[in-house]
Image (cartoon, coloured by chain):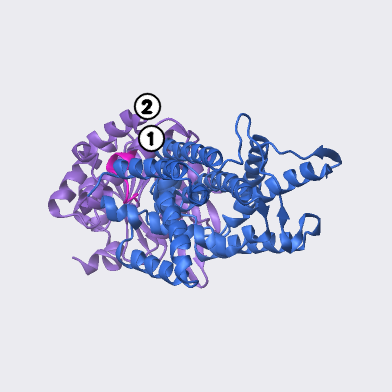
Amino acid sequence: MIPERLVNWIVFAGLLAFPLWAVVADEPFTITLVTRAVILAIAAVGLNIALGIGGLVSLGHAVFFGLGGYAMGILAYHAQTYTSLDLFGMSLSGTKSMPIIWLVAVVVSALAAWIIGLLSLRTSGVYFIMITLAFGQMFYYFAISWGTYGGEDGLSIYVRNGFPGLNTLVPIQFFGLCFALLGIVLFLNARLQSAPFGLALNAARQVPTRVETVGLNPTRLKLVAFVISGAITGLAGALFADLNRFVSPTMFSWQLSGELIVLIIIGGVGRLYGPVIGACLFVALEHWLGAVTEFWHVYLGLILLAIVLFARGGIIGLLTGKEGAYV
Amino acid sequence: MSEALLETRALRKSFGALTATDNVSIDLHPGEIHAIIGPNGAGKSTLIAQICGGLKPDSGSVHLLGRDVTQDSTQARARAGLGRTFQISALAMEDSVLENVVLGALGASGNPWRFWSRALSDTSLTAKAEAALERVGLIEHRHTRCAELSHGQRRQLEVAVALTLSPRAFVMDEPMAGLGAEGSKLLTGFLDQLRAEAPILLVEHDMDAVFALADRISVLVYGKVIATGTVDEIRQSRAVREAYLGEEA
């Protein structure tokens, strides 16, 4: 069995080394592929805070991914068309600046997570899954019918947004940005997990009655976890939109919410690097198996089945001999 | 007699036609162990739930330290000084023994909103937690995963978590359940000491423990308190014998 810390470092180093090799080998598409994996990993790290530590099986995390995406799309759209964004009687201008877009994505997603969480956390178990799914579908159909921003066709952004001091159109530079953000998000997650908040949240997933009898409110702990979770997934949404230079309602689709859960389960529920490993495997399968057969999801399904039946700790669990968090 | 720390007044709760708690008034004074006994289905768990906040009574009230807490949540009652242990261990099984007790210390601190510092490096939390583990004799197992503890050790851990809250009154739901003779004896000795710190409302099936520990006993049958008295009074009560002890004696 390999210590978990070592597995984590190997994954982290591998994720950095692979695109650097691709630069030398002049394979820009590989860099884009790894960038995609990194962004999905950020989204899943976000979900893992709610799902893995808090035990909240949210089938609506695409809402935050989509909100992040549309935050980027709308701001960049107004900037590229030189039109003003009229909001609450204010006339704002769009922006092509990534830091501002990220901030907006995070704030909007956090706000949405707070409202959705307040309503959803009145329920638990299968009802929680259904109510988050319902919110996801609401946003999906709203985006489809929102003609101002492309409706079903989505929005194309012609030039990738900028970051001070970098040329984000160079694949490796954009990768570097996303990778740095993944590192920051993982670091925050690690701190949060071993902090008093993480300890209490972890207990609230396992024995809410115990948390109540020591005088803490488990629902409030879960709500805060849901907000943090949504904010991180929202940030990933903004990056994803920038990677594709395109936003469409599919970012709100429930399939995406499901995929995020699947890749956490494959990697290891509640484990810090579970979502990262899951995202890498997902993108790798999508690319290589997808080239062989369009039914590659069948193989993904078989892997998922094998893990759920025989390796409850996911790939991290297989490598380290630790079980995953029981949700 | 001194003023009661914990008291129920004319508590009533029914589920449909079944009256689970019928006009129950009991109290708990400083320094005592007040045992609640009764056959299965007598309404002991329902009564505990109303005292601790899991269930709201149909009528009547619960008073903690002289204050009416009937409408308060479980959390509020815990913060006000009610320490509880569960019949079936309610512990975070995936976590270590120390983490479980630190949760109690965190509850006592009242501030779980710290996202950066390490919980297990915070000496204000761990000192309190380790002191509690020391007292119940689990300090050597502090890094053991809770799921790997024996049944008896889990009972001890339950008590340790309650201790971290420095409660003013304990409510213990069958702490001896499933313990062997040896474990039961150890815990009996421990509870005997504990009463000086905070009184204990003890729901228990183990009659040896009850008769050894209790200052007063209340007998609950079909939701009603049919007798309250000292150990001798209860042993000699005819009504109690017929209703309850008769099965065993």
Image chain in blue: A
Q: Position of residue B152 (x, y in %)?
A: 21, 51
Q: Is residue A96 left or right of residue A323?
A: right
| Chain B tint as drawn | purple
Instruction: Give whichever of discs 1 and 2 has the lower sequence position.
Output: 1
How many numbered marks are there?
2
**Residue at x-position 62% and y-position 52%:** A244
The image shows residue A282, relative to residue A11, as above or below, that is below
* Quarter of the image where the C terminus of chain A is located: bottom left
Amino acid type at mark 1:
Ala
The residue positioned 50% from the left and 57% from the top of the image is A260
Question: Residue A234 or B32: which is nearer the viewer?
Answer: A234
At label 2, the amino acid type is Ser
Packing grade of label 1 (10 A; few <14, some 14-19, many >=20) is many
Residue at (22% x, 50% y) in the render? A1
Horizontal side of A131 relative to A270 (left or right) equals right
